[in-house]
Image (spheres, helix red, strand yellow):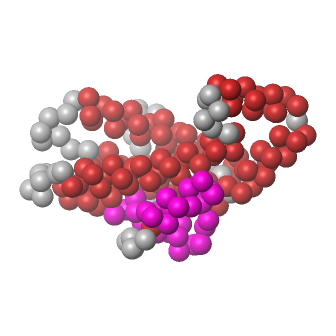
Amino acid sequence: CIRDSSNIDSLREFHRVFIPELEKAFDSWTPLSMIGPVFEKYLPFFKLYIGFINNYDKIIELVKRLQKKNKAFSQFEEEFVAFTKNQMAMTSIFSLPLQRLFAYVSHLEDLITYTSSDHPDYTRIESSLANIKSVVDLIKTQKIEPPDSSKQEFKKRTEGNSTESMGDERTLSESVDSSVL
């Protein structure tokens, strides 16, 4: 099943717990606050993007088949395009997870640029950035092609970035305090 092998549900669950923790850290921000520990806690789950990217073509193929053969789906797609004011086709929504991965890299790069090297969080931010970049490197070394709409961004972000990949394959429930879920 595409849904199982693409990690869509796992990515959603990951962000369901990760984003609120990030927001909590930012809502109580002080000059000595640390965001690195939040990223460190969830670093293994960034590998979920690999399964999604590996199955991107299958997902798009399924959407195209549904567009041709399923009237209800076609109607839903028309409503979706109208809702987005013709800004997004149904197939383009599936490039959003990859764009989110690149946004994390970009935001952490910005954060490290504006964080003093003597700040207590500097090395943790730097480490988190390197580990998230390693996911992008892993995608690159496995010759996984990103969605067409993101190929230019993929090439731009992966040029010259080579860090060791993370080896931790724990599940969300193994790594996160159950009270967070």
Considering every residue shown, the one lying at the far right of the view is: 69
| Residue 66 is covered by the magenta coloring | no
Considering every residue shown, the one lying at the far left of the view is: 118
In the image, taking residue 161 as reference, residue 150 lies left or right, namely right
Q: Can the viewer see residue 166?
A: no
Residue in the picture at 60% in, 35% down: 87
Q: Tell me if residue 16 comes above or below residue 162 in the rendering.
A: above
Q: Nearer the viewer, residue 2 or 180?
A: 2
Quadrant assignment, res 167: bottom left
> Magenta region: which residues?
130-157
Q: Can the viewer see residue 110?
A: yes
Type of secondary structure dominating the magenta stretch? helix
Q: Position of residue 13 (x, y in %)?
A: 53, 39
Q: Tell me if residue 118 comes above or below residue 166 in the rendering.
A: above
Q: Nearer the viewer, residue 62 or 92?
A: 92
Considering every residue shown, the one lying at the far front of the view is: 86
Q: Position of residue 174 (x, y in %)?
A: 47, 48
Residue in the picture at 31% in, 52% down: 108
